[in-house]
Image (cartoon, rainbow, N blue to C red):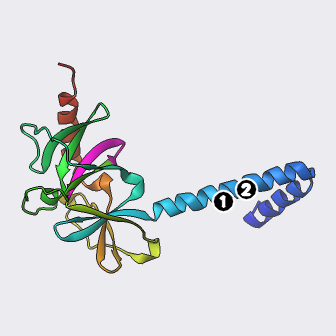
């Protein structure tokens, strides 16, 4: 059965329902459409922040929360850009310095710096950024493809959006190379073991 015939069949079946049931089906379809619209709107929302005098954006669905920088416990033998771990709601959360991750010089933190807690492959990770800017709606047609990145860099840049300024869109799931992510998870898991 083709798509047109399927639609015709569904419409015919609905027209044969008692008025109350047909009204329930109509309301249910409206709810589904509204849920689809809300999901699409969420996919188009990005938290924007500054790092190394550039504007970055990460999809709002990957953002858990934004914190002032609490004390960070450094960990021995960790990656150069891993600052350590913080305790957040009884979870040990690895924290990276995004500036160092992007290959820039480390800089002293100010009261403008904050940690964006991100959902990375189902786990919480913190990224120290220079400051948070805004939540912006960026539609797919406003996004250009980025230039190809070196494989070792993780291909975290997913697009470039042009507004008053250029916004580099990143995917937190690809911010780390596979081995780096496993190393950070191992270190934070060891650190959260009971003493």
Q: Which residues make up the magenta segment?
A: 119-129
How many numbered marks does the figure carry? 2
Residue 55 image-quadrant placement: bottom left
The residue that mark 2 highlights is 29
Residue furthest toward the front?
A: 111
Does the magenta run of residues contain 118?
A: no
Q: Residue at x 77, y 67 (%)?
A: 4
Label 1: how many residues lie within 10 Å, few (<14), some (14-19) or many (20+)? few
Q: Secondary structure at mark 2?
A: helix
Q: Residue at x 33, y 81 (%)?
A: 164
Label 2: how many residues lie within 10 Å, few (<14), some (14-19) or many (20+)? few
Q: Secondary structure at mark 1?
A: helix
| Front-lying residue, 162 or 136 | 136
Tell me: 183 left or right of 64: left
The residue that mark 1 highlights is 33
Residue 121 image-quadrant placement: top left
User: Would residue 145 be visible to someone looking at this image?
Assistant: yes
Question: How far across and down, in percent of the image, does residue 50 sit?
Answer: 23, 66
Residue furthest toward the top?
A: 195
- Image quarter of the C terminus: top left
């Amino acid at each position: 059965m083709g798509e047109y015939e399927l639609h015709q069949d569904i419409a015919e079946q609905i027209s044969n329902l008692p008025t109350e049931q047909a009204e329930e089906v109509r309301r249910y379809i409206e709810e589904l459409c509204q849920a689809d619209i809300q999901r699409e709107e969420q996919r188009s929302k990005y938290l924007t922040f500054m790092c190394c005098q550039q504007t970055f954006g990460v999809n709002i669905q990957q953002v858990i929360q934004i914190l002032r920088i609490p004390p960070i416990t450094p960990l021995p033998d960790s990656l150069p850009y891993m600052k350590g771990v913080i305790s957040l709601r009884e979870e040990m959360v690895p924290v990276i310095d995004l500036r160092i991750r992007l290959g820039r010089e480390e800089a002293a933190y100010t009261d403008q710096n904050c940690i964006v807690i991100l959902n990375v492959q189902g786990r919480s990770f913190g990224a120290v950024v220079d400051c948070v800017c805004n939540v912006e709606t960026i539609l797919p047609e406003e996004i250009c493809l980025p230039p190809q990145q070196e494989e070792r860099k993780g291909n975290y840049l997913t697009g470039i959006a042009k507004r008053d300024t250029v916004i580099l869109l990143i995917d937190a799931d690809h911010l780390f190379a596979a081995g780096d992510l496993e190393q950070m998870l191992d270190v934070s898991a060891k650190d959260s073991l009971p003493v």
